[in-house]
Structure formats: structure tokens, C-alpha cells
Image: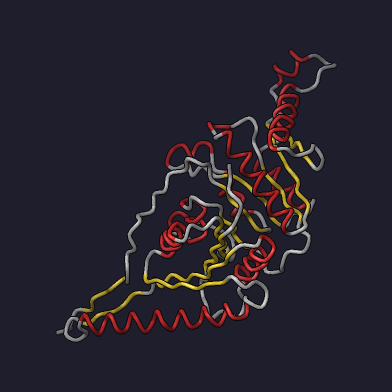
Amino acid sequence: MLQPVRHILAAVKDPSAPSLPAVAKATQLARSLGAELELFHAIDAAVYADMLGASVPRLEQVECEERTTYLQRLERIAARVRLHTPMVTVAAEWDFPSYEAIVRRALESKADLLVAECHPGRHRAQGILRLADWELLRLCPIPVLLVKRARPYHRPTILAAVDPAQSFGKPAALDEQILVLGAQFSNALQGTLHAAHAYQPANIGALVAAGSDGAEPNAVSAQIGLESLLGRAGLAMTRCHLLRGAPQEALEQLAQRLPADIVVAGSVSRSGLQSALIGNTAEWLLRHLTCDLLIVKPPQFANRVPACRAGPRQVTLEPRG
């Protein structure tokens, strides 16, 4: 069962940025949940070393000074955050790539939730460009809140996307985790929790077999599955939506109609041919939703990020001539 959120890690992409939506929303959540908040920045800039000049001690000094500078910037942010929630710490480490550094820090600090800003604009060729938010969605074992909207939460509408049919071998426990985390957010932020399940309509043969007076078989099965899931999670059947059609488009349309502030969805991080054939709803939602996206992984999700930090990314400049 999913544990209560007690430690939140906020990934700070640029501590000098004038606006930090991920930090603002992480602060809201930390205050509402009574959780500790950690502000983390991964220093993944290249360190250029001249083969004729810079010695190892000098490089270490530069790295130390740069890390100190980032820690000071994070402390200035933390000072403002502490006006709203007291339990705030900061951390900065030389590590790359940034998304692996963030996952490593989340696991090291035993965070229960990671909050990060979403890459601005539409996601195109994200697997080639290695966009940090897309990689966090794919690799991070703990729940990830990807922030798309800057405005703070105010009694938010939270939409939990579930799949009682367990399409494509999706773990049964994942839906219950989605509902539990959605309920935690809804209760803490005094919001409203909705649950949605999209099903594919039956083919013509199934409809004929059901008879003219019979209900659509897939709809009946989906309704039974949704009621059973909500019963196991201890949630009432109010604010539930049974959607007919492809899950991605149906969820996007419902999120716009409500309108939703956060969509909670699961990801099993498929890859290769399997992903190409059946797609990945979470990745599709990342590209198309305009609201924030909260991604939950199954309990047995395998961490594929190396435990050891990569350290500074050193680039040696060869002498000319």
C-alpha cells in the first residue's frame, strides 16, 4: 500500500529563475500534508579543463565554489518558503544527466514524492532529446508531480485515471495506489476527487449477441470493474466517470470539461516494440494535457538508474598547434 507523503523533493531547474512554479506547489503540498520539503538542484554543467593548465586541486576548487554558489541560491529560496512551511532543507550535487541525478537524490533522501517543472511547449521526439520531465516519468520509481500550470492550487479538481480491466498486463495494485494518492492530495488541498475509466466499445458481433434490449457488454463489464475497484479502495461511487472510447482522448476531453487541476495516472514504463504497439497513456497525457500530471508507478517497479553519482562532467580542451 502507498505510504503517506512525508518527504517531498522539489527539483529546481534554475535557482535564479524569477518564477518557480514547482517550488510553489511543492510548498503548498508540504504545508498541507505536514511533510518535509527538500529543494534540490543537479549541477550538470560541463567543467572545461585545459590540458596545459588546470590541475586537479584547481578543478576541485572550482567545483566546490560552484556548488557553494548554488547552495546559497537555494537557501535564499528556502528562506521564502519557510514563511509558509518550516521543515525545508536544500541540496546541490555535481551529477549528470540531470534526470538521473534527480532520481538518485530522491532515493537517497527517501522522498515519497518528486515535484518537477514540465518542459515548456509541446513534447516532440522526447526520447531522442532526452527531456528531463519525460525521463523522470519513465525512470523514477516514486510518484512524480509534473507541474504545467503556474497558478497555485485552490480547492483543486483531481482526476484519477484508473483501468480495472488491467489492460496489457497492468498491475492490479496500481489503480488502488492511484486512488489512494489522489485522495491524499484531495483531502490535503481541500479539493474534489473524481475517478474515470475509459473502455473500448464492443464490436458489432458482440452487440448483436447482446440483443436489442441488452446493454453494451463492454460497458457493463467496465461498470462492474469500476464499482469493485472503488469498493476495495473505500471510495463512494460519486464523481465517477465511465468513458467510451480510447483512454487518451477520453481522459483529455474529461479533464478539459471538469476542468481538472491534476490528473493522476499510472505508468509501467514500457519500452521497445511493446510501447510502439500499445502506446503509453501517461506519456501521451504528458504531451497533450494542459493541467498538472501526477504519475504513479507499481510497487514492483524496477529502478534502472545507477546508484553512484556521476560527478562533474569534465571536458578536456586539447591545445592547438
Q: Nearer the viewer, residue 154 or 280?
A: 154
Name the residue: 80% across, 14% down.
Answer: 211
Q: Nearer the viewer, residue 249 or 184?
A: 184
Quadrant position of the C terminus in the picture: bottom left
Q: Quadrant of residue 201?
A: top right
Q: Relative to residue 107, is residue 62 drawn left or right?
A: left
Q: Relative to residue 111, is residue 207 drawn left or right?
A: right
Q: Position of residue 89 (x, y in %)?
A: 52, 72
**Relative height, residue 279 to residue 69 (above, below):** above
Q: Relative to residue 56, is residue 238 drawn left or right?
A: right
Q: Nearer the viewer, residue 58 or 209?
A: 58
Name the residue: 78% across, 52% down.
Answer: 192
Quadrant position of the N terminus in the picture: top right
Callout count: 0
Name the residue: 62% across, 73% down.
Answer: 86
Q: Position of residue 153 (x, y in %)?
A: 73, 64
Q: Quadrant of residue 206?
A: top right
Residue that lies at the very extreme toward the right in this rendered image: 213
Q: Position of residue 147 (x, y in %)?
A: 62, 62
Name the residue: 56% across, 72% down.
Answer: 88
- Colour convention: secondary structure
Q: Relative to residue 276, is residue 59 drawn left or right?
A: left
Q: Position of residue 94 (x, y in %)?
A: 37, 71
Q: Nearer the viewer, residue 217 or 31?
A: 31
